[in-house]
Image (cartoon, rainbow, N blue to C red):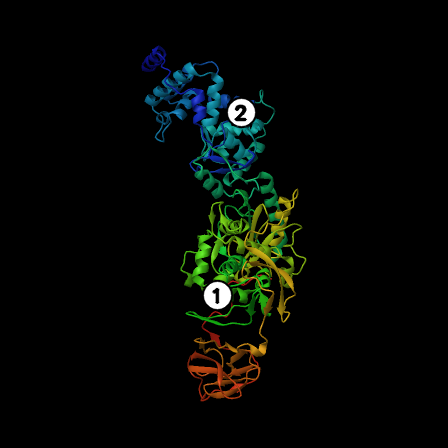
Amino acid sequence: MKILAWLLLLVALPVHAAVPTPQEVKAAWRSSDTTLLDRHGEILATVRVDMAGRRLGWVALDDISPTLGRAVLQAEDQRFMEHGGIDFQAIGKAAWDNLFGQQRTRGASTITMQLAGLLDPKLAPRSKGRTWARKWDQALAARELEAGWNKRQILEAYLNLASYRGELQGIGAAARNLFGKAPSGLDAGEAAILASLLRAPTAPPRTVAKRACALARELAGELEPRTDCAAIEWEVDAAFARTASAPASAPTGVTPQFVRRLGGAVGSSSGSVVRSTLDAGLQRFAVATLRRHLAELAGRNVGDGAVIVIDNASGDVLAYVANGGAGEVDGVTALRQAGSTLKPFLYELALERGQLTAASLLDDTPVDIPTVGGLYVPQNYDHQYRDAASVRTSLAGSLNVPAVRTLMLTGLERFHERLRALGITSLTEAPEFYGWSLALGSGDVSLLELAQAYRTLANGGVQDGKRRVLDARASFIVADILSDRAARSTTFGLSNELATGFWSAVKTGTSKDMRDNWCVGFSDRYTVGVWVGNFDGRSMWDVSGVSGAAPAWRDVMDYLHRDRPSRPPAAPPGVVRQTVRFAPAVEPERSEWFVRGTEVALVEMLPPAKRAPRIVYPAADSVIALDPDIPAPLQRVSLRAYGGAGLRWQLDGTDAGPADRGATWAPLAGEHEVKLVGEDGRAVAAARFEVRGAAAPGQLASTFSTSTGGSAIRSSGNGVNSGESER
């Protein structure tokens, strides 16, 4: 009698249409993804930004397979088209089963009542079970829904709002993640599986398969034949295995972090559409190019890379390839050692300050620089020295020793400050932290900030079209050097991946132990940066800038100028062209650019006989450590000098032989002084140094030898530069 009274009261209550409209529900739906568009409106990528649930876009009922609709009605609400939101027959049967303890095969909740629970969390079933009070509230809400909605709208909203499995919410995400297809393409078996999941989304695979098989048999007369339970069981296993792993993303090279960062910058959220400055065609080409070259370099232990393309005039990022397919790692913003890519800004600073010209000759001979940590011994990539090289040759050929000498000329603090002004924010330590190796790129930089710095150089020293950071005249000369394939040929040869068929300026770089390889350059319209290496820091095998990053750089640059070649920039006011020759002819006569007022017609270099001799090793104030693991008779220090012809070594007042030949010394612990002395006995160079460690037993005096056997002495300094340049 209580149940009958409850039903009669429910029928008699008036309907209050206090429910949202179908349009409001649809408008409130948010996909868990953000869609990234290119500059022309083409879809580039979709990236999940809401981790609370996996949702795709709202799916209209016309875009859902009718097979699924029939399967859901059969499983959940067979009288859906007949009742007004409440199935009194189902409620009566449920009450009867509850009173007399009979097993209930289906619940009394209609699809409309379930939709009411999805729209209002207070009406949703709770873990402690359903109550008649909640059923009452659901029934009232269902009547209100039926009064304002039609059956198609109710079914469409239900299929879109329901949870199917795990985090999958809505038919769009369920069909895509479980079966890899759109809702319109669901077949009978798939429809039966999804309909079975609605009742128990967390049920084990065997239970879901059993229910789906039974449902498919019930519908055998309506659906195409698909009652093979073994096939349905296999389909369930395959679907659950598919949703356990993240769906593969399209090879766009865009990471989720990039999309989230871009979306945050424009104030977007999940379900939003973000228009970017990227060009879809260029993006696809850059991704394909990087992946192809990484495959070619796989045999040299190269697994990762990144590419960025920037429009010089606007600063728009036209291509952003964060990686070659290595998940969410962003190689464009990752910090890596810069290698020789910072050298153009060092030489620009020296030219700007009038300390050097493009024709100035730089010393390219061995040098040991004392530091608080020991000796810093920069070396050229090929371990060869050219005696002297012009600024043009030193920069274009990426020589290390002249670069370090240039940094000593300009000043470490001033160069560090200039790099920071260029926007390289990662150099957060004091200049002394990086030391003289900053000339060779010992600091960590990102491809994004490095490319932006090169864009400033491409724009004549103006940053973001408004702030001058570099001198226009010096920037022009540096760009001219970076475009000079003849000057580059001394190291790279005339034919290489850096030589485009149009005007371009480019620099490569390789970090210590070949962990990072760069190629960054610009044309009149674009700046392109490429990095290759390994995200885990593993070293590459015999990879230089020309063989590593340069091929991808060249292909992208060729693509950008496939329709219009790049043209060289016009010379700014204040630069002049002057024919210059060298005496002696260490370099051929050529026409050279100068900042007005610094031009010269002849660059003379003192002959070796007139150059001041100097001690190369041991350097002044250096500390040498004896190795306790090596027998004392085998430990030797090599005495090395530059310009030692006609001079002799003198160590602690004792003659040690001619200085123009190699000499070795069996060291003793203590403080020592080495000199270069002339025939008259006067010293022309001297250096004090210290040897640390216990004296070998029985070793009472130092001995000298003119043999050049290998030294077994440890220097307390770094004997190899920390930013070796590429060839």
Q: Residue furthest front?
A: 597
The vertical placement of 92 against 394, above or below, is: above
How would you rate the neighbour count of disc 2 (Cα within 10 Å): few for under 14, some for 14-19, many for 20 or more? Answer: many
**Residue 381 or 431: which is nearer the viewer?**
431
Residue 110 visible: no
Which corner quadrant of the image does residue 540 belong to? bottom right
Please give the name of the residue rendered at 59% of the width and 76% of the height, measured from the top-left corner: 607
Q: Which mark is residue 630?
A: none
Crowding near the residue tagged with mark 1, few <14, some 14–19, many ≥20 C-alpha atoms within 10 Å? few
What amino acid is found at the position of numbered circle 1 in the picture?
A: Leu
Instruction: Residue 554 in the image: state x and y as whole percent.
Output: 63, 50
Residue at the disc numbered 2: 68
Q: Nearer the viewer, residue 5 or 173?
A: 173
- Residue at the (51%, 77%) spot, across then down: 614
Residue 409 is labelled as 1
Mark-to-mark CA distance, 1 and 2 = 77 Å
Side of 588 where 114 appears, left or right: left
Q: Secondary structure at mark 1?
A: helix
**Position of residue 543 measured from the top left corner of the image (x, y, whole percent):** 60, 59
Q: Which of these two is toward me, 439 or 106?
A: 439
Query: Is 592 positioned to the left or the right of 144 in the image?
Result: right
Secondary structure at badge 2 equals helix
Q: Is residue 240 visible?
A: yes
Residue at (65% x, 59% y) in the render: 486
